[in-house]
Image (spheres, coloured by chain):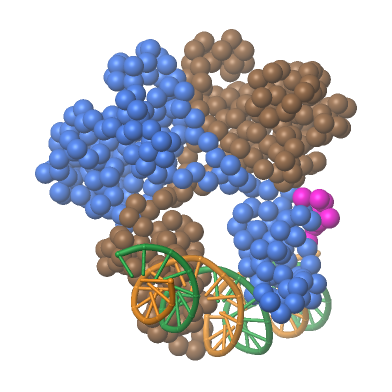
Chain colours: A brown, B blue, C green, D orange
Amino acid sequence: MSRQKDNKSFRDIKAIVLERIQSGTWAPDAILPSESALVTEFGSTRTTVNRALRELAEEGYLERKRKAGTRVLRAPVRHARFAIPLTRVEIEGTGARYRYALIGAEMRDMPDWLRARLDLRGAARAAHVRALHYADGKPFQYEDRWIVEASVPEVAEADFSDTGPNEWLIERIPVSNVELSFMATRADQTVAALMDAPLGEPIFTAERLTWLRGQPVTFARLHFAPGYRMTTRI
Amino acid sequence: MSRQKDNKSFRDIKAIVLERIQSGTWAPDAILPSESALVTEFGSTRTTVNRALRELAEEGYLERKRKAGTRVLRAPVRHARFAIPLTRVEIEGTGARYRYALIGAEMRDMPDWLRARLDLRGAARAAHVRALHYADGKPFQYEDRWIVEASVPEVAEADFSDTGPNEWLIERIPVSNVELSFMATRADQTVAALMDAPLGEPIFTAERLTWLRGQPVTFARLHFAPGYRMTTRI
DNA sequence: CTGCCCGATATGTACAGGTATAAGAGCGAC
DNA sequence: GTCGCTCTTATACCTGTACATATCGGGCAG
């Protein structure tokens, strides 16, 4: 016997509530029954009902306010979730062979636009690393990255010829705050040559800004091969 | 008096655990103490510790397995979360004035590529709607959408001259499964003319496929104005 | 009528204890 | 050895209970 009776798990309750929202039983803007009312209906406890409703609220279907009750959102604010794996993992995940090639790495003074971007006052040195990631021998992603020396002093001695700067960084800065942007850019001379694409080709591009405890760590611009699609299901 | 002693809330515990991960006290791949061990350390209950760890696992920092224990992930699988609001809401959120203009709407037989994309066998009719969304008088997004008649029969009589098809759909199909893709495309004749952009300009493009209970509902291609960036913080 | 306070109420969170389930570890039969 | 079994253990989840806290709305003083 699984459990004593036909008691609903929080998963069951989530499914039932979602079904009622989808079918229109509980229309948008409607206040749904209080937790304790649902407890008597489903024959479980408030803890369980609470978890179900809380997760549905987190997923954007409901809005909950103390005393006000739980309301069905009119236009559910859907959230797309993208996994952001290492490039190597992303490539290997498709079954392709991964290859990495360093193009160049030097220590330099950061250019003004970058200092502005990172909110850094005063001069600062950084490693400028450029690298290519291949999938099955074809260029997959061109990585153009700056790593702030003040935040990661070891970078001055780092060797990126075998390991990508991303994996190198993850060893040292495992967790951090990230600001990610995606955009469409035009292939310039460098990108066109490296990606084997015509000049001006639209390139799916990601910019990634990373901080650790308020200190800027790295700025990366990732140029994906023509035709790249970032896909998710929600 | 807030609570009886200095007991930790699940938020406190999350913060402490995260701090230990970030500072390397609990290095990647390390198994951290069992829930009951943490209970004695933090002086709370397993429910509380459990919630803290569960949420950290959801956020991609930890991996939890029954019996195996809780492990710090080497390369935290970070998840970027993007809110997917209505275009109108997105524009109004920036403080800009929203304007909508219908370009065309007709019922047609679906082209082959679309039927293949939606996994539909046999002929099927759909509404083909094209519309422009403006922010402060400038084109912001060109929407090219197909709505499957079999799934939303009212679409044959719908009038999209005042309301965008997206808002119209949300009234009828509040919740659904979505597959979202983002890519960089080249502005073709239509897009270039409507967006007031040069031919061939890189365009940030989203494709959105929607199902309700396994039935394909709509396919939309959203072309954003040149320079558009999709940004998030994680 | 207006502004403030205060009680009722719904959700937020915590505690204490229990059962269910997955999976590693060790043992024995073959 | 190795396959299959049981035992143990750590997490997953549930039941009940209690108190905390935000907020709506009504009542009262000015």
In this rendering, would A39 be left or right of B138?
A: right
**In which quarter of the view is residue B208 placed?**
top left
Left/right of residue C5 with respect to residue B79 in the rendered view? left
Q: Nearer the viewer, residue A146 or B219?
A: A146
Residue for point 58% across, 42% down = B233
Corner quadrant of residue A61: bottom left
Regarding residue A228, the answer to whether it shows in the image is no
Q: Is residue B132 above or below residue A92?
A: above
Write the residue at 26% across / 33% down. B100
Residue A166 in sight: yes
Number of labels in the image equals 0
Q: Main secondary structure of the magenta part?
A: loop
| Residue A27 placement (x, y as % from top left) | 28, 63
- Find residue A59 and report its horizontal and vertical position in percent: 46, 57
Measuring from the top left, give residue B176's x and y in whole percent.
34, 53
Q: Is residue C12 above or below residue A193?
A: below
Extent of the magenta region: B22-31
A22 displayed left or right of A122: left
Please identify the quadrant where the N terminus of chain B is shown.
bottom right
Q: Residue at x 59, y 16 (%)?
A: A191
Residue B186 in percent (x, y) is at 41, 19
